[in-house]
Amino acid sequence: MSDRESTVNWWKQKTEELRLQLHLGKKEAEEKFEEEKKRIEHWAETTREEIGDLSSGKAKAFKAKLDTLRLQAALGKAESKSAVEEQEKKLKLALEDAQKEAQHLAEDSSEKIATVGRNAQDKMGIWQTQMDIFRLQLQLGKKEAEVEWETKKKQIREKLNEMDHSIEQMKKDGSESLDNFKSEISKSWKHFKSAFSKD
């Protein structure tokens, strides 16, 4: 499988995971949140090792943010609703901070470091969206939250369909380089994320 096909398949998988997450109830969402915390923790550890002993200031700053992210993700299962909400909030902030540092890595002159930064931005962007969805799902106890959730689910589904369409269009245009493809899919993702985050 080519890098291009692998990238297309990764993005398709992520949009499908988000689509599936929309159908979870509150209890299932809490379980999924715990699963994602473990994935984030493992990813942060693996990415930190991948960077290795790189001593650039950007790499060191990113590793520090990965350590914070890993620590937030490693917290045990919260038992109360307020504790779950607090963990979700802190984890989302740690993701945002690490993603900002990943952006600096993506701009590095070393291709290895820049690739790690771009890949990290993509993964953390997906997790941030998942955190936004978790936040809404955790508030399902109130009737007005249920109405808001149904409206938001419809909007998210529409945006995911647009994202799928963009992925398919870029997949069909085989003449485009992998870097251009990744750039275009990242732009589509940012558009999806900004539309989702406006409310």
Image (cartoon, rainbow, N blue to C red):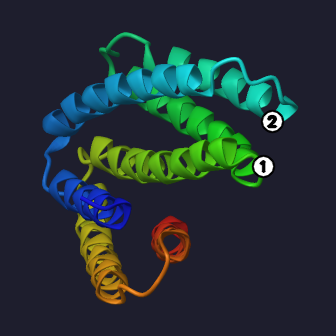
| 59 to the left or right of 77 | right
Q: Depth check: 162 or 27 in front?
A: 162
Which amino acid, mark 2? Lys
Residue 62 in the image: state x and y as whole percent.
71, 31
- Residue 60: which quarter of the image? top right
Task: Tell me if mark 1 has few (under 14), some (14-19) or many (20+) residues whose alpha carbon lies within 10 angstroms of its own.
Answer: some
Q: Amino acid at mark 1?
A: Asp
Image quarter of the N terminus:
bottom left
Label count reads 2
> Residue at horizontal 25%, vertical 48%?
140
Q: Nearer the viewer, mark 2 or mark 1?
A: 1
Residue displayed at 43% across by 12% down: 75
* SS type, badge 1: loop
The disc label shown at residue 58, or none: 2
Left or right placement of residue 85 versus residue 65 in this view: left
Q: Are marks 2 and 1 in contact (CB under 8 Å)?
A: yes
Residue pictured at 53% horizontal, 38% vertical: 92
Question: Seen in the image, is 3 located left or right of residue 35?
Answer: right
From what the image shows, is residue 116 above or below residue 53? Answer: below
Q: Spatial distance from mark 2 to mark 1, Cα to Cα?
A: 8 Å
Give SS at disc 2.
helix
Q: Earlier in the sequence, mark 2 or mark 1?
A: 2
- Which of the labelled discs sits on residue 108, or is there none? 1
Q: Is residue 52 visible?
A: yes
Name the image quarter holding residue 36: top left
Say if residue 81 shows up in the picture. no
